[in-house]
Image (tube, helix red, strand yellow):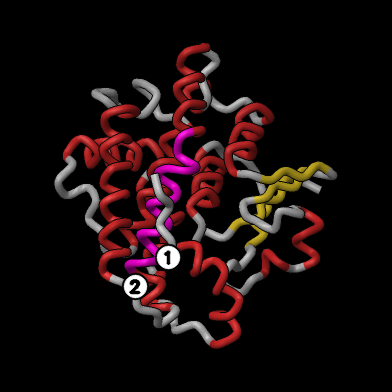
Amino acid sequence: MGLQLYLDLLSQPCRAVYIFAKKNGIPFELRTVDLLKGQHYSDDFAQVNPLRKVPALKDGDFTLAESVAILLYLTRKYETPDHWYPQDLQARARVDEYLAWQHTALRTSCTRTMWQKMLFPVFLGQRVPPETLASTLAELDRCLQLLEDKFLKDQDFLSGPHISVADLVAITELMHPVSAGCDIFKNRPKLAAWRKRVEDAVGEDLFQEAHAVIMKAKDLPPADTAMKERLKPLAQLLLHNAVR
């Protein structure tokens, strides 16, 4: 059996894996796992990923979890062009540095922003205290400034003159708050120009295809009682802003 990717394109790391595989012509079978329906908690999926999270990879008898591990596995197995994960020691270290930082910084603030600004009021019918949303947006702004100042600087891409997996991971994160109506690029011309370069490097059609689900999330029908109950632990977590 060939490569299988277990994804839900509502998820930002799933979108990064999807774009990478498609852009590099990697043949795979898409196995959709509907997060909002709780399919990642099924016993069948637990056989693929006991962590019960997406993305997940199955390559013959080999299974792999975690988006960064999956992206790097694909770069090595399919010997993708060097710019995605450079052989040069310091260039690769810059990619690694961003991938290590983003998990508890940009990932957290982008996810909280989307849920607090859109999914809580629209999907769950739950009010978000204005001070909670204001704090989340302030943290997002802080992370965006760090993204510009620490990682992008005056370069074309996050790790230098060419696109890498770091850029895919970053842009898919940023589309979360965009889907919730946050124009995060409006007053950030450097970041807006970077976004355009990433989209051009990926290809507009593929970029739009990967983000079609999240851009329509605002049109989701209200969650039923069972789904609200299932999402309650996540909701509590996403309403609690981490202290930094």
Q: Is residue 173 left or right of residue 237?
A: left
- CB within 8 Å, label 1 to label 2: yes
What amino acid is labelled 2 in the image?
Answer: Val
Residue bearing the label numbered 2? 128
Few, some or many residues within 10 Å of mark 1 (<14, 14–19, 20+): some
What amino acid is labelled 1 in the image?
Answer: Leu
Q: Position of residue 237 (x, y in %)?
A: 50, 62
113 within the magenta span: yes
At mark 1, the secondary structure is helix
Q: Is residue 136 left or right of residue 75?
A: left
At x 38%, y 24%, the residue is 162
Magenta residues (range): 101-117
233 within the magenta span: no
Q: Quadrant of the C terminus?
A: top left
Q: Position of residue 26 (x, y in %)?
A: 61, 40
Image quadrant of residue 145? top left
* Residue furthest front as drawn: 243
Upstream in sequence: badge 1 or badge 2: 2
Q: Which SS does the magenta portion mostly show?
A: helix
| Mark linked to residue 239 | 1
Q: Is residue 185 left or right of residue 75?
A: left
Between the C-alphas of marks 1 and 2, the distance is 8 Å
Between 12 and 228, the one nearer to me in the picture:
228
In this figure, what is the number of numbered marks? Answer: 2
Q: Position of residue 233 (x, y in %)?
A: 57, 69
- On screen, residue 232 above or below 97: below
Q: Position of residue 96 (x, y in %)?
A: 51, 26
Few, some or many residues within 10 Å of mark 2 (<14, 14–19, 20+): some
At x 44%, y 50%, the residue is 108
At mark 2, the secondary structure is loop
